[in-house]
Image (cartoon, helix red, strand yellow):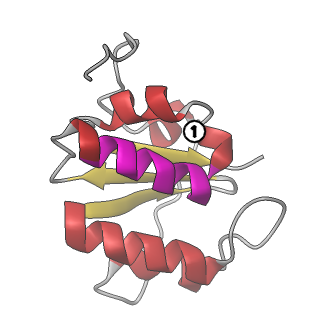
Amino acid sequence: MNQPWPELPQRPTDLRCAASSDMVLIVLIPTVRPWEAAAYLGFGGVNACPAPWVHVAYAREWSARFGARLLVLTHDTLEFEVARPITSREDAAAMAAVHAHYCSDSCPSKVEHAAYLLGAPLWEFWWD
């Protein structure tokens, strides 16, 4: 049974962290695989934020499946550009469950997050 999905505000079309900062630091990492960035920078492993190897594993999988590229990494946020966005409700619901496991702070409602993921060109995660 197909129930209507929640109406969501307009999804962002640009990177929020980079656009909202007064200062942006561009870092060149010695790899051709952007999904390794969290390991090079030691991102994660505190509070509810997963260890660097977890970020690398998810980023590698999302790169292969969705063409996702990590573009923004701050002290508490990751933002991915998604070349091949999710196109079905079933896939969006499944990925919303994965995202909720990965980062519960940025996925309070799986239904709303699944609706957001459908066609989304950007994925954002943050940890308190």
Residue 17, percent from left and from top: 52, 40
Residue farthest toward the bottom in the current orientation of the protein: 30
Residue farthest toward the front in the current orientation of the protein: 1
Identify the residue at horizontal 58%, vertical 59% (top origin): 102
Q: Is 128 on the left-hand or right-hand side of 72?
A: right
Q: Nearer the viewer, residue 90 or 70?
A: 90
Amino acid under label 1? Answer: Cys
Give the residues in magenta.
91-103
Q: Nearer the viewer, residue 110 or 128?
A: 110
Q: Is 119 on the left-hand or right-hand side of 11?
A: left
Does residue 17 appear in the picture of this structure?
A: yes
Circle 1 sits on which residue? 107
* Residue 101 belongs to the span the image colors magenta: yes
Quadrant showing the N terminus = top left
Residue 14, percent from left and from top: 33, 34
Residue farthest toward the right in the current orientation of the protein: 47
| Residue 71 lies in quadrant | bottom left
Residue 30, percent from left and from top: 40, 89
User: Is 20 above or below relative to 7?
Assistant: below
| Main SS category, magenta section | helix
